[in-house]
Amino acid sequence: MSRWLLETDAHDNHLAEKPPNLLSTRMERRLVIVSAGYREFIGRYPLHAGAADQLKVFCDNITEDLGTIRRWEEARAENPDCPVPWNDLAHELAHNGRILDAFACFEKTLSFASDEAVYHFDYATALLLYRGNAMSHYKLTERELFDRVLLLYRQGMKLAPQSYPFAADFARTYYVVRPARPAAGLAAWENAFKLATDDTQRDEARIHLARYAIHAGHLNLARIHLEPVTETGLEPVKLSLLRRIDDSGKARNAALTPAPGKR
């Protein structure tokens, strides 16, 4: 079924001449065949543990997939050259646990609209969220996977260089990337701060800049970043970071203070 889906050409010039539910009908026929095989097995081995449960799980999953595919078919029939149905399908498949099929659909989306930043970000985010699946599927090491994710984000940023939401998403990625790349993460948040268009966005960026400053041991700089933050929703985070600054400062002073009796 996955192969049938991915073989479907989004730019099919004869799409209007074909039944709009061709793929879902084909899937339904396969469902009947496989279900019959399950039921035959259950008839021969009625006491087999779990067979009936497996049949129910299979039917439930396929029924859910069929609903997803039908919505995709309807959207695609209305506009066969549009990447949106493929992107929507990718999200639904990922949500339903069909991660590898979702990756393939994200790739399809990008192949039809490589000039849209959002599709680069959506695919990168999926790879990041499901990196275990991605590493296994694409035969990548963890570092190679992170490099691919960052490359997709950078490509998206080139297409939407003035977008704060995209810039912030890109910058947040560096909290997950291993090995850590603090210089790149700091630069990403500095860029996001420059792109902020309101006080809420600027305060969010300041919080992250303060985190990087604390991590680097620049406690006074961290205070400078935090001082202008007034967003109510960020107040608990601000207070937590100020406590970290105070604790780090005390620890630093204690390390520099000679023990009694020593010079």
Image (cartoon, rainbow, N blue to C red):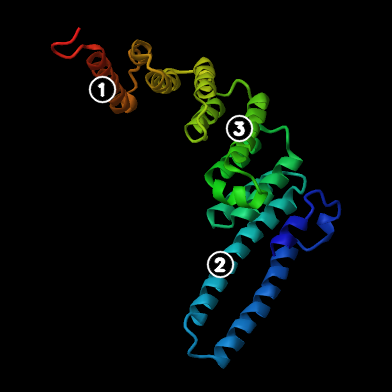
Q: Measured from the top left, where is residue 193 in percent x and y? A: 49, 17
Per the image, label 1 sits on a secondary structure element best described as: helix
Up-down: is 43 above or below 123?
below
The residue at which mark 3 appears reads as: 150
Q: Amino acid at mark 2?
A: Asn
* Numbered tag placed on residue 243 in the rendering: 1
Q: Residue furthest bottom?
A: 44
In the rendered image, the residue lying farthest to the front is 262
Q: Quadrant of the C terminus?
A: top left
Residue depicted at 67% across the width and 48% down the height: 138
Against 20, is 34 above or below? Answer: below
Q: Is residue 39 above or below residue 16?
A: below
x and y, in percent, of residue 169 in the image: 52, 31
Which residue is at the front of the view, 245 or 18? Answer: 245
Q: Identify the residue position indicated by label 2 in the image.
A: 61
- Residue 118 visible from this viewpoint: no
Dividing the picture into quadrants, the one containing residue 163 is top right
Q: Nearer the viewer, mark 2 or mark 3?
A: 3
Left or right: where 111 falls relative to 177:
right
What is the distance, in whole Å, between disc 2 and disc 3 at their CAs?
33 Å
Q: Amino acid at mark 1?
A: Arg
The answer, for residue 111, to whether it is visible in the render is yes
Identity, as a three-letter code, of the amino acid under mark 3: Leu
- Of residue 256 and residue 2, the one placed in the foreground of this image is 256
Q: CA distance from mark 2 to mark 1?
A: 49 Å
What is the x, y in percent for residue 195? Answer: 54, 18
Do the residues under discs 2 and 3 have CB atoms within 8 angstroms?
A: no
Residue at point 86%, 55% (across, down):
14
Residue at point 54% right, 77% down? 55
Q: Nearer the viewer, mark 2 or mark 1?
A: 1
